[in-house]
Image (tube, rainbow, N blue to C red):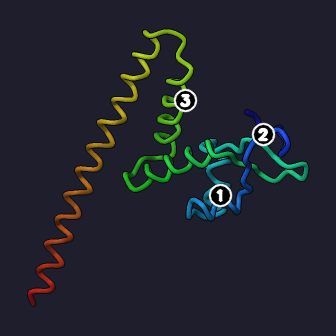
Amino acid sequence: MTDERTAEEVEATLRIGELADRSSMSLRTLRHYDEVGLLTPSGRTVGGFRLYTERDVDRLLLIRRMKPLGFSLDAMAELLRVADSLESAATPEEAAGIRTRLDAFIADAAARRAKLEEQLAMADEFLALLRAR
């Protein structure tokens, strides 16, 4: 899909404000994600307003889940490219190579999650110390 598709060509569209409401993200963040290529609108109205589909919503929710894990915008973009390329793999060998790259992201995300769990445990200990005073 390209930016040049019109509202009539894009099914079940949301404007950027509706997407912001559904995702609990700011308009500024959504525009930034468009500028850096993380979330490209599926179409535009005749007046040039961005239009998003349910697939775009799913993509945005994936991006939103990466943020707390501390992934950079570049890492997010790479993960999205890998995930997108898995759908279009031409051969089983190509799919296996892509899956290997995806597995590396999974391992990285798991390590980041474990670090967050450690930080939460430390925060719980800190709160317990404060409450004990």
**Residue type highlighted by circle 3:** Asp
Report whether 48 appears left or right of 93.
right
Q: Give residue 110's position: percent from left, percent from top.
A: 28, 43
Residue at image position (34%, 30%) is: 104
Do callouts 1 and 2 mark residues in contact (Cβ within 8 Å)?
Answer: no
**Residue type highlighted by circle 2:** Asp
Label 2 vs 3, first from the N-terminus: 2
Q: Give residue 131's position: percent from left, percent from top.
A: 14, 86
Residue at image position (54%, 11%) is: 90
Q: Quadrant of the C terminus?
A: bottom left
Report whether 45 appears left or right of 52.
right
The residue positioned farthest toward the left in the image shown: 132
Q: Which mark is residue 132?
A: none
Give SS at disc 2.
loop
Q: What residue did someone put label 1 on? A: 19
Residue at image position (57%, 59%) is: 23
In this view of the protein, which residue sits in the foreground, 69 or 92? 92
Label 3 vs 1, first from the N-terminus: 1
Q: What residue did someone put label 2 on? A: 3
What is the C-alpha distance between the residues marked 2 and 3? 18 Å
Occupied quadrant, residue 106: top left
